[in-house]
Image (cartoon, rainbow, N blue to C red):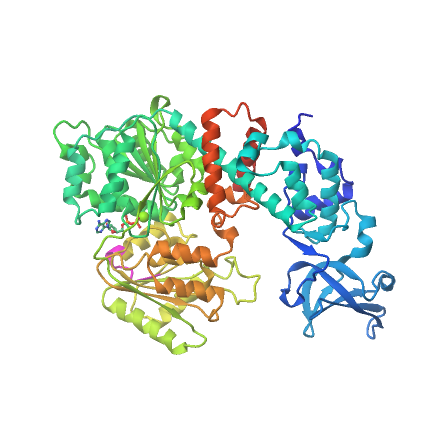
């Protein structure tokens, strides 16, 4: 076995088959790497008991507590006995029950301290653990190789099939077996570790799994977090260097009449930010290495115009530009939007003719989505392959191998978080003669610098900080139907008034119908509002309005019809899911009501609200929720009601949100590989890792001298790919 092979050694060959099976079933831990990288969630101290008052029903917990009393009762109705053990943290108590296992009384003695692992429940107002697994601390050292000899007891994320002390024992076995070999597995070679002032891998793993002091844990934690940051940054910097090693076709736009004509025809003046970013992009695409740029800008900051201008530069240079949207609704809206922005310039076949006599063939704006009929599809593919289509808009259908481009010069990815690195790579192969297209990624989710560095570390970042002036106000209020029932009636009245005034209204619900899974169905909350129910109520309460549903289970054509209806005024009110979240542009929309708004996160609500107040008409956004005042859910809603500044909201969001969610569910596989590193709090670590990764790669671009780091990057890629497959 090569030294790196140790990581992939199956636990089955080292631990007993039963233990290995339980680790795999319960926690998905299969290899030495899996187990050694399964770090404790927290540490209990022998002298310190778990606060019982803080336990939450249905949670699987491990509790350190003292036995206060032990009683055995005969059960009256059924035959048998019940053993009740009262354990305490000195203040509160918890009842531990065993049915028909009287012999346990011998193991559980008053005054003893133990670890108890089970699922919390409440019975007659008494917290309890039924049939927990347990181990008495005084006896444990004899039983487990890891032992509870130290004063500090690691508490691992565990499951019903494996307890934290079984994990601890297994980790101990593996550390003892492979401790020496860890030296050659360390992704941070001694010089790197030394420069960064962190300890070696073996010391770190001993310190995180078998600490004897708090300092040891801290030191280990810091080193392992740095390692995560360093491996990730090295991967990203390397990816960036590889991209910069590719060739791209420079697209030089020398005062093209096409773009001048476009700018002149715009019904507004570009903001300073739009001009600046536009100049940056022009400079990027004039180079012979592919642009790799992220454009972040708040909802409504006008990213599309910036993208279209860049696309026109490429078209004027004879190339093709693609705009990729995450949904069909957005793609067709973008196509319609671009056609209307282009005005007379966009008449099929006349785009370049309008630009001047030197132009060759005309170009077209072509839309390609998954739901295109076969004839449309064939025509679109043909126009793309022949080069007649200059501006191509579509969904991921454009990524398929059957799509051939004549001269792909620029790829713009709107609302990137739904596209991964792989998709970007798929398009990168489509440019002619081994060149790569320029890539512009756009996101409306403002992210702090170190988060961007973690998720998009291979991209240059530009920011559109301002929203064009003259934008109408949107007043946002939280409506609590439990405490303010009259406000709900007022809400319907207001919707009626808006519709009477000729405006458009959006009602947003968390679910389509009762079959639609409810993220929150596990919790105490009643099931969230559905499009089906709200649609019915809307038809009853607003009999004069034209009302349509809009959600992800409708076909692309059906959705388009509703979008068009909203634009023309044939539809007054759309009852929808979050399909309208990104990018949907209906200037006459003035009112939005979000039902069970607490089911959505801050940035999602901000995106949703961005659908109204886009024209000159002021808007109103009502967040309907019974979330208790002071609860985190209500805090989120209040934050959204307090400001329309997306960057400010992103900051608030990070304050309120749990760290694990910062990277977003579908954003990328990055999250799966971060165990200890926290992208916001550990900003310093990330920045230091970035600098060190850059300097290392400048000395050793292929990492030939750093095989264990190379192996760690490969493992990271694997893990991220697996994560993306699963989601
Ligand atoms: P987003 O950044 O959310 O994608 P859009 O590009 O969709 O924003 O722009 C939002 C709206 O603002 C569109 O209707 C667009 O035509 C308009 N817009 C863009 N730039 C300006 C500007 N400089 N002045 C006024 N309106 C603008
Ligand atoms: Mg947009």
In the displayed orientation, state which residue is furthest to the top.
433
Q: Kindly indicate the quadrant of the structure image that contains residue 389.
A: top left
The quadrant of the picture occupied by the N terminus is: top right
Q: Is residue 504 magenta?
A: no
Q: Is 582 placed above or below 283 here? A: below
Vertical relation: 10 (above or below) 3 = below
Q: Nearer the viewer, residue 280 or 727?
A: 280
* The residue positioned farthest toward the left in the image shown: 357
Q: In the figure, is residue 154 to the left or right of 342?
A: right
Looking at the image, which is closer to me, 21 or 67? 67
Residue 548 occupies quadrant: bottom left
What residue is shown at x 33% (from left), y 29% (from top)? 405
Residue 25 or 65: which is nearer the viewer? 65
Q: Is residue 136 left or right of residue 492?
A: right
Do we see residue 288 in this rendering? yes
Looking at the rendered structure, the number of numbered marks drawn on it comes to 0
Q: Position of residue 393 (x, y in %)?
A: 31, 40
Comparing 723 with 199, the one in front is 199
Q: In this rendering, would 343 be left or right of 390?
A: left
For residue 401, say whether it is visible: no
Along the horizontal axis of the image, is 196 left or right of 57?
left
Q: Residue at x 27, y 48 (%)?
A: 302
| Magenta-drawn segment | 567-574
Give above or below for 79 relative to 604: below
Residue occupying image coordinates x 64% and y 62%:
58
Q: Position of residue 97 (x, y in %)?
A: 77, 66
x and y percentages locating residue 255 in the rendered image = 16, 32
Q: Point out residue 546 in the picture as x, y percentages from the top left corner.
A: 30, 64
């Amino acid at each position: 076995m090569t030294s790196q092979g140790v990581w992939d050694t199956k636990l089955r060959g080292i631990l007993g088959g039963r233990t290995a099976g339980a680790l795999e079933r319960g926690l998905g831990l299969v290899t030495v790497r899996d187990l050694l990288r399964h770090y404790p969630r927290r540490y209990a101290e022998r002298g310190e008991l778990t606060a019982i008052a803080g336990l939450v029903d249905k949670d699987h917990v491990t509790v350190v507590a003292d036995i206060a009393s032990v009683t055995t009762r005969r059960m009256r109705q059924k035959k048998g006995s019940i053993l009740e053990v009262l354990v305490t943290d000195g203040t509160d108590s918890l009842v531990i029950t065993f049915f028909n296992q009287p012999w346990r009384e011998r193991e559980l003695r008053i005054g003893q301290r133990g670890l108890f692992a089970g699922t919390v429940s409440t019975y007659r107002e008494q917290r309890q653990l039924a049939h927990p697994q347990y181990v008495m601390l005084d006896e444990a050292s004899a039983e487990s190789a890891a032992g509870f000899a130290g004063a500090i007891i690691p508490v691992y994320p565990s499951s019903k099939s494996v307890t934290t002390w079984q994990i601890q024992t297994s980790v101990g076995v593996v550390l003892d077996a492979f401790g020496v070999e860890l030296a050659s597995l360390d992704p941070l070679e001694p010089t790197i570790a030394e420069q960064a002032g962190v300890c070696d891998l073996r010391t770190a793993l001993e310190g995180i799994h078998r600490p004897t002091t708090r300092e040891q844990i801290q030191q280990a934690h810091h080193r392992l977090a740095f390692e995560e940051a360093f491996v990730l940054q090295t991967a990203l910097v390397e990816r960036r260097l590889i991209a910069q090693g590719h060739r791209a076709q420079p697209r030089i736009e020398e005062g093209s009449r096409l773009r001048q004509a476009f700018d002149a025809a715009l019904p507004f003046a570009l903001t300073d930010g739009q001009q600046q970013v536009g100049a940056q992009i022009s400079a990027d695409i004039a180079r012979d290495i592919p642009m790799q740029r992220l454009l972040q800008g708040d909802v409504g900051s006008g990213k599309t115009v910036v993208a279209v201008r860049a696309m026109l530069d490429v078209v004027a240079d004879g190339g093709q530009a693609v705009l990729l949207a995450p949904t069909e609704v957005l793609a067709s809206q973008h196509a319609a939007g671009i056609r209307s922005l282009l005005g007379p310039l966009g008449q099929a076949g006349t785009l370049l003719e309008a630009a001047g006599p030197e132009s060759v063939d005309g170009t077209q704006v072509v839309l390609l989505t998954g739901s295109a009929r076969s004839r449309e599809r064939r025509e679109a593919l043909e126009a793309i392959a022949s080069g007649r289509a200059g501006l191509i808009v579509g969904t991921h259908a454009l990524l398929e191998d059957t799509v051939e481009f004549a001269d792909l010069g620029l790829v713009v990815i709107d609302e990137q978080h739904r596209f991964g690195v792989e998709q970007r790579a798929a398009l990168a192969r489509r440019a002619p003669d081994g060149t790569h297209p320029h890539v512009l990624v756009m996101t409306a989710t403002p992210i702090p610098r170190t988060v961007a560095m973690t998720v998009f570390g291979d991209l240059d970042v530009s920011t559109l900080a301002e929203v064009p002036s003259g934008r109408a106000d949107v007043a946002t209020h939280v409506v609590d139907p439990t405490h303010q029932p009259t406000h709900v009636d007022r809400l319907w009245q207001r919707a009626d008034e808006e519709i009477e005034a000729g405006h458009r209204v959006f009602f947003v619900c968390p679910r389509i119908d009762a079959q639609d899974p409810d993220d929150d169905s596990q919790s105490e909350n009643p099931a969230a509002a559905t499009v089906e129910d709200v649609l019915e109520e809307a038809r009853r309460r607003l009999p004069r309005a034209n009302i349509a549903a809009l959600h992800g289970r409708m076909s692309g054509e059906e959705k388009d019809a509703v979008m068009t209806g909203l634009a023309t005024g044939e539809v007054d009110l759309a009852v929808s899911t979050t399909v309208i979240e990104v990018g949907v542009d209906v200037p006459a929309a003035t009112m939005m009501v979000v039902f069970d708004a607490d089911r959505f996160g801050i940035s999602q609500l901000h995106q949703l609200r961005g659908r109204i107040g886009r024209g000159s008409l002021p808007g109103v956004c009502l967040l309907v929720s019974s979330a208790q005042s002071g609860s985190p859910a209500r805090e989120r809603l209040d934050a959204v009601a307090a400001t329309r500044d997306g960057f400010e909201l992103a900051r608030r969001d990070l304050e309120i949100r749990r760290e694990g969610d910062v990277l977003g569910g579908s954003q990328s596989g990055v999250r799966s590989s971060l165990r200890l590193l926290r992208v916001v709090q550990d900003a310093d670590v990330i920045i230091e890792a970035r600098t060190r990764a850059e300097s290392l790669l400048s000395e050793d671009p292929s990492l030939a001298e750093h095989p264990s780091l190379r192996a760690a990057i490969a493992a990271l890629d694997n893990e991220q790919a697996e994560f993306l497959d699963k989601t």
